[in-house]
Image: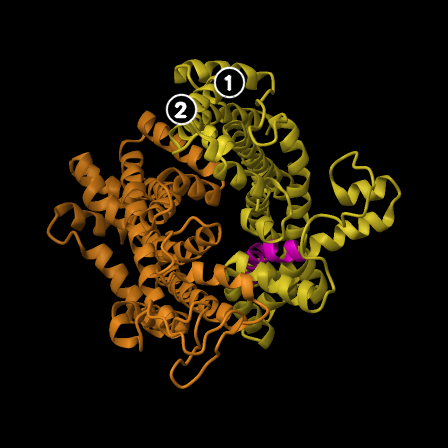
């Protein structure tokens, strides 16, 4: 297991090197450099040249790359052109928001999807099964931003039950030692602040969690249906075991294996930022941050952010692979 | 069974049979599958509307009717305009009908571009193996490590706001998916009995790959192609929402129509409903058809 994990981590090195080169070339190929974003209408050739020199963009590309990677090795991703703050600090501010949102979204998908898929799989063609099939289909087919608008319109604008923008009420001035707003509220003992952060998470988490929900429901249903027809289930029933024990120990445990795979993959996707959801709800996570950086040609942020997200994505997938060994003893021996 | 098939294939006189058998079988099962029928109906309706848009639409998608339109007033459904007028006084039904053309165009172009590059890469990796395979697959890993929408936004930003940029952006997202799929499918086929049988008869490697392994690896690609059309419509809508579609406001693109309604959702919620419904129904059609194809083409479910 350890050998496998180390090998996978080593494989990460060429991927990240290749990615860093591609991203580096990509930002330099973008039409309009940081000087356009910074100077706007005040753009003159002299001013543009000064900005480019200040960011080292006038040097040969390979020279820029070598000096950039030298800094990256020391975890220095440069300074954001937009905010003039270190990129690592900016990511540190946004990433907790993304983690919080992804956690709530995937929890929503798991807590609704697994029971729904389970019941649908145990009673195929029942009204609940048909309902969940049609529901999953709509969940997959509706654009995320449209669902976001719909939720915001109904629950924030019309009914006023939940906030529709931001991560926390602006009047709340609790300290943020970790950057995870819910956790910060709990740690500092400010329960109203924590609750307020939870309320801000509900609508975006539902919008973001709908596609994982649909996928988890479908996979759970298919797995439960398949496992229910296995020989060992019939044997267990023939031995006179109660339906509950057969369901829990034989069907559920085996059926959950593919579900865990999907949950892992989906978590990896969600953690890499939810550009559309974060934009609709002005949530301020990695997704909308990266999209903004692309629009404003914020080279250091694009470079550092994409590398960071790629590392997160690959590491999460690695953890998923490793977790199989714990859930399925058969993987350990083979 | 597989051995005799392999020998027949290797003899070269009935080389299409295995694939033809699977596809004929699949077609028979598709006709009996309610999922396939609903999916195919939605897809055919979508393609029909897209192709015959000029005949079906009651008005031009850019014609403006200013008789009833005032700021903040959105004339709803009426006899002349079954779905009402949009914020600029254009007939909503005609715009939805013409919008099908753009969604189909974006889907087909991005799929053909992305799939052909992806399949070429997958074919090279699957056929040569060894270091070529490693090199191609590391490249695919790099593309997959970037979140797909971010990749699409990046490509669209690189090429400027044009309709063709949207198509290329979605195509780029498709490349690694098809490359990995075909390569995996080919690796599985290369180890099969019929490939071994062909090799033992002295058939050249390039012929085994091109005539036997490649055609037999295509089933999952067909399924993915159908699903990719669904994803293309959704992704085009997302890019339009972020302002990366065509800058021409005259183009009736569903994603953009939906995104634009956000500004006056409270006074004209129906204007958000129509493009939303069009997107959901067309995506559902391709998705259902893809799922039905997946079941029909699964050799494990063959009798």
| Chain shown in orange | B
Which image quadrant for residue A319?
A: top right
Local crowd at mark 1 within 10 Å, few (<14), some, or many (≥20)?
few
- The residue indicated by pointer 1 is A54
| On-image quarter of the N terminus of chain A | top right
**Residue B32 screen position, x and y as percent:** 35, 74
Task: Tell me the colour chain A is drawn in.
Answer: yellow
> In this rendering, which labeled residue sits more in front, label 1 or label 2?
2
A177 displayed left or right of B221 = right
- Quick check: do tags 1 and 2 share a chain? yes
Q: Is residue A64 visible?
A: yes
Color theme of the render = by chain
In the image, residue A229 sits, relative to residue A90, either above or below, namely: below
B58 displayed left or right of A263 = left
Q: In the image as oriented, which residue stretches furthest toward the bottom?
A: B79
The residue tagged with tag 2: helix, strand or loop?
A: helix
Which image quadrant for residue B197?
A: top left
Which image quadrant for residue B20?
A: bottom left
Q: Nearer the viewer, residue A46 or A234?
A: A46
Q: Nearer the viewer, residue B238 or B212?
A: B238
Q: Residue at x 38, y 83 (%)?
A: B80
Q: Nearer the viewer, residue B99 or B197?
A: B99
Instruction: Give the chain letter at badge 2.
Output: A
Q: Residue at x 43, y 13 (%)?
A: A63
The residue tagged with tag 1: helix, strand or loop?
A: helix
Is residue A215 highlighted in magenta? yes
Local crowd at mark 2 within 10 Å, few (<14), some, or many (≥20)?
few
Q: Is residue A297 visible?
A: no
Q: Which residues are magenta?
A: A203-224
- The residue indicated by pointer 2 is A45
Instruction: Give the chain letter at badge 1.
Output: A
**Residue B98 screen position, x and y as percent:** 32, 67
């Amino acid at each position: 297991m350890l050998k496998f994990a180390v090998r996978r981590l080593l494989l990460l090195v060429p991927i990240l090197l290749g990615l860093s080169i591609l991203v580096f070339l990509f930002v330099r190929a973008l039409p309009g450099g940081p000087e356009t974003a910074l100077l706007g209408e005040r753009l003159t050739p002299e001013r543009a040249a000064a900005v480019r020199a200040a960011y080292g963009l006038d040097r040969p590309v390979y020279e820029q790359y070598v000096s950039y990677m030298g800094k990256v090795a020391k975890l220095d991703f440069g300074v954001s052109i937009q905010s003039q703050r270190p990129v690592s600090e900016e990511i540190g501010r946004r990433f907790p928001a993304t983690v919080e949102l992804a956690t709530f979204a995937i929890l929503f998908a798991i807590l609704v999807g697994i029971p729904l898929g389970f019941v649908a799989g145990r009673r195929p063609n029942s009204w609940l099964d048909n309902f969940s099939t049609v529901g999953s289909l709509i969940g997959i087919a509706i654009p995320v931003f449209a669902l976001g608008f719909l939720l915001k319109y109904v629950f924030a604008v019309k009914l006023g039950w939940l906030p529709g923008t931001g991560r926390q009420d602006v009047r709340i001035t609790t300290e943020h030692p970790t950057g995870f707003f819910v956790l910060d509220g709990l740690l500092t003992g400010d329960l109203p602040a924590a609750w307020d952060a939870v309320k801000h998470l509900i609508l975006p988490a539902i919008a973001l969690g709908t596609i994982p929900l649909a996928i988890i429901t479908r996979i759970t249903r298919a797995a439960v249906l398949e496992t229910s027809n296995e020989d060992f289930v019939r044997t267990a029933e023939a031995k006179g075991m109660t339906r509950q024990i057969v369901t829990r120990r034989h069907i559920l445990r085996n059926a959950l294996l593919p579900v865990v795979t999907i949950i892992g993959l989906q978590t990896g996707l969600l953690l890499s930022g939810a550009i559309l959801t974060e934009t609709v709800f002005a949530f301020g996570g990695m997704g909308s941050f990266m999209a903004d950086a692309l629009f404003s040609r914020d080279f250091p942020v694009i470079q550092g952010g994409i590398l960071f997200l790629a590392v997160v994505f690959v590491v999460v997938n690695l953890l998923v692979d490793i977790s199989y060994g714990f859930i399925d003893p058969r993987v350990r021996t083979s | 069974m597989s051995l005799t098939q392999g020998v027949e294939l290797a003899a070269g006189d009935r080389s299409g049979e295995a694939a033809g058998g699977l596809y004929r079988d699949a077609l028979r099962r598709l006709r009996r599958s309610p999922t396939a029928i609903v999916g195919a109906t939605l897809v055919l309706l979508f393609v029909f509307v897209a192709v015959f848009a000029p005949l079906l639409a009651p008005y031009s998608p850019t014609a403006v009717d200013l008789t009833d339109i005032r700021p903040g007033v959105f004339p709803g459904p009426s006899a002349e305009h079954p779905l009402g007028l949009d914020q600029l006084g254009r007939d909503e039904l005609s715009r939805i009908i013409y919008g099908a053309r753009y969604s189909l165009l974006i889907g087909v172009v991005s799929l053909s571009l992305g799939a052909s590059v992806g399949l070429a890469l997958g074919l090279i990796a699957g056929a040569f193996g060894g270091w070529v395979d490693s090199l191609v697959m590391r490249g695919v890993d790099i593309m997959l490590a970037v979140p797909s929408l971010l990749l699409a936004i990046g490509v669209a930003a690189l090429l400027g706001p044009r309709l063709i940029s949207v198509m290329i952006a979605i195509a780029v997202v498709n490349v690694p998916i098809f490359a990995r799929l075909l390569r995996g499918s080919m690796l599985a086929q290369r180890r099969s009995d019929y490939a071994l049988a062909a090799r033992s008869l002295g058939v050249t490697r390039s012929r085994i790959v091109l005539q036997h392994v490649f055609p037999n690896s295509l089933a999952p690609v067909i399924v993915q192609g159908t699903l990719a059309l669904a994803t293309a419509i959704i992704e085009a809508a997302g890019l339009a929402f972020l302002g990366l579609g065509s800058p021409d406001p005259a183009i009736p693109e569903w994603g953009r129509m939906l995104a634009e309604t956000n500004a006056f959702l409270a006074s004209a919620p129906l204007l958000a409903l129509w493009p939303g419904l069009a997107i959901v129904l067309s995506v559902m059609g391709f998705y259902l058809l893809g799922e039905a194809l997946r079941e029909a083409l699964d050799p494990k479910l063959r009798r």
